[in-house]
Image (cartoon, rainbow, N blue to C red):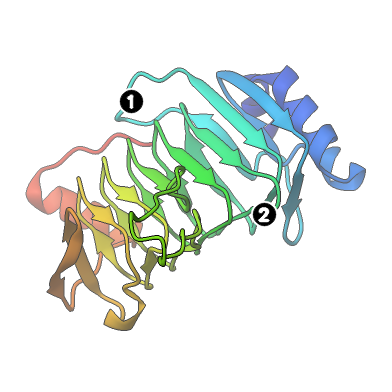
Amino acid sequence: MSNFMDLLKSNVTKTIWFNFKMLPWKQAIRLPVVFYGRVSFRSLKGIVSIKGGVSTGMIKIGVNQYVDTGVPESIWIIDGIMKFNGPMKMARGSYIHVAKNATLSIGSVGTFFGSNLRILCWDKITFGNSVRITWDCQFYDTSFHYIESLDPTKDIKSLTKPVSIGDRVWIGNRTTISKGAMIPDDTIVASNSLVNKDFSDIGPYCMLAGMPAVVKTKEIRRIFDVKKQTQLDKQFGYQRHKL
């Protein structure tokens, strides 16, 4: 009943169109992907897949967030492959571009993307499980434009390099993750950072910060346990709005 009532609050037309356009009929009939608010599908020539069983509204796109950056419309261009590995949420104002021959994979288990999200995938971008991303963040695996050396013996480099975000990664607001970035499990990325290289050798439980980002702190992690978070809010006198 709750899923049905929630569906009534959605952008029903865009929700039905996306599910039956992009998913097999047996999945589409359950409306697993639900869109809210203003939505523009500029291209849906690619493939969308959902791993495992599906349920109504398991993937919510365009939900409200307690911090709203004022971008009312979600814009999606899916010409490549977009994979959902389970339930997740994305706040409103997302711009998703999966180019032809590119693959965008999004993890499950509490994964959340904040408002005004930008993902430009020309090659391969992978998000692990339980990833939490705040508002005004952007991810891209391409430099968009070619650069050549004045030395004719040097080759022009490829525009793209894969991006990988591990499990339980927490990324602060107004952060840019660019091509070649590899972020290991249980990493915190501080606000206003630029991650543009492979950090996979640093191991888990580190904080990255800066432009470009460097390792600032080790042996720390975000508390994801809701019960413990509630206890700490009470201890410090904070009142939290639900997403």
Can you tell which quarter of the image residue 173 is in? top left
Image check: 92 left or right of 211?
A: right
Say which mark, if any, is on residue 68. Answer: 1
Say which mark, if any, is on residue 83. Answer: 2
Quarter of the image that includes the C terminus: top left
* Of the pair 212 and 56, the residue shown nearer to us: 212
Image check: 129 left or right of 78?
A: left
Residue 221 at x, y percent in the picture: 24, 69
Q: Nearer the viewer, mark 2 or mark 1?
A: 2
Residue 118 at x, y percent in the picture: 44, 38
Mark sitting earlier along the chain (2/1)? 1
Q: SS at mark 2?
A: strand
Q: SS at mark 1?
A: loop
Amino acid on which disc 1 is placed? Asp
**Is 147 placed above or below 17 here?**
below
Residue at x 39%, y 49% (from the top left corner)? 147
Can you tell which quarter of the image residue 189 is in? bottom left
Quarter of the image that includes the N terminus: top right
* Of the pair 222 and 188, the residue shown nearer to us: 188
Crowd around label 1: few <14 · some 14–19 · many ≥20 (10 Å): some
Image check: 220 left or right of 27?
A: left
Between the C-alphas of marks 2 and 1, the distance is: 26 Å
Residue at x 82%, y 43% (from the top left corner)? 23
Q: How many marks?
A: 2
